[in-house]
Image: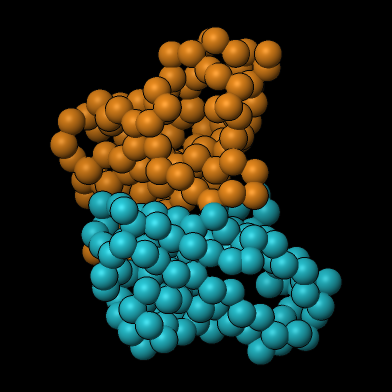
């Protein structure tokens, strides 16, 4: 069966420090992968999506970047965190537009 | 423009009573609509989805939703609330032809009183 792993679950980082959040998918091949951010009191905002290895599309210009070094691995990074980067980050995968499966999320607090 | 409106930010019910979480959509096309549930500091779990098949959709944990085109609604219901249903619920619309561009409602927080 397909599973999606996302870590860490919580993270507290100082302003200006780097960030690396990792997401891996098991049980499927060539999935579409996504990073979303959920700010307090809001719905989810799509940050990046990837349809294949090395293919990254950015939806929102910001302080973050994404990479897909392997078919089932998706990484969200930043060189220098800002206070505004705080939020709940969710990774998701899909094969079709009819279904998205989300990871358990990472609560990032930038202090 | 496509949009999703969840009419209540907070709903409180007693255990064993019915649940109604309201969602209206605005779309020029026949939409794909979903309900997701999110427990505190957890990811999103798919409850059910409508993709232009049967208008009454049954999901997990006893939830169901009815797609009503004439009312542009996709309300989520459950006959009898359980304490474990306390969570935040999101109505979600998938933008046709988009890649991952899910349009989320702002969420409805469901509280269940004993």
Residue at horizontal 40 percent and vertical 57 percent from the top: A3
Q: Is residue A42 something that shows in the picture? A: yes
Numbered marks: total: 0
| Residue closest to the eye, A21 or B98 | A21
Residue at horizontal 77 percent and vertical 86 percent from the top: A16
Depicted A104 relative to depicted B10: above or below = below
Residue at horizontal 61 percent and vertical 79 percent from the top: A20
The image quadrant that residue A40 belongs to is bottom right
Residue B36 position in % (x across, y down) = 45, 42
Residue B43 position in % (x across, y down) = 53, 51
Residue extending furthest toward the top: B16
| Residue closest to the eye, A51 or B65 | A51
Left or right of residue A24, residue B69 in this image: left
Chain the render paints orange: B
Depicted A77 relative to depicted B44: above or below = below
Split into 4 quadrants, where in the image is the C terminus of chain B?
top right
Identify the colour of chain A in the image: cyan
Residue B3 position in % (x across, y down) = 41, 49
Residue B67 position in % (x across, y down) = 28, 31
The image quadrant that residue B10 belongs to is top right
Split into 4 quadrants, where in the image is the N terminus of chain B?
bottom left
Residue at horizontal 64 percent and vertical 49 percent from the top: B41
């Amino acid at each position: 069966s397909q599973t999606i792993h996302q870590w860490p679950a919580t993270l507290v980082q100082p302003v200006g420090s780097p960030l690396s959040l990792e997401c891996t998918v098991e049980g499927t091949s060539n999935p579409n992968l996504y990073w979303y951010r959920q700010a307090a009191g809001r719905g989810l905002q799509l940050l990046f999506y990837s349809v294949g290895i090395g293919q990254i599309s950015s939806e929102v210009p910001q302080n973050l970047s994404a990479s897909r070094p392997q078919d089932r691995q998706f990484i969200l990074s930043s060189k220098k965190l800002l206070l505004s980067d705080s939020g709940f980050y969710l990774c998701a995968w899909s094969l079709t537009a009819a279904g998205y499966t989300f990871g358990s999320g990472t609560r990032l607090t930038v202090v | 423009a496509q949009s999703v409106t969840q009419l209540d930010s907070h709903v409180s019910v007693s255990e064993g009573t019915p649940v109604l979480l309201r969602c209206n959509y605005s779309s020029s096309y026949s939409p794909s609509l979903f309900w997701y549930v999110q427990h505190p500091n957890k990811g999103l779990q798919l409850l059910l989805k409508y993709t232009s098949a049967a208008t009454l959709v049954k999901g997990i944990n006893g939830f169901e939703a009815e797609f009503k085109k004439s009312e542009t609604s996709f309300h989520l219901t459950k006959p009898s609330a359980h304490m474990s249903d306390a969570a935040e619920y999101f109505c979600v619309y998938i933008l046709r032809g988009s890649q991952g561009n899910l349009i989320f409602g702002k969420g409805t927080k469901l509280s269940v009183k004993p």
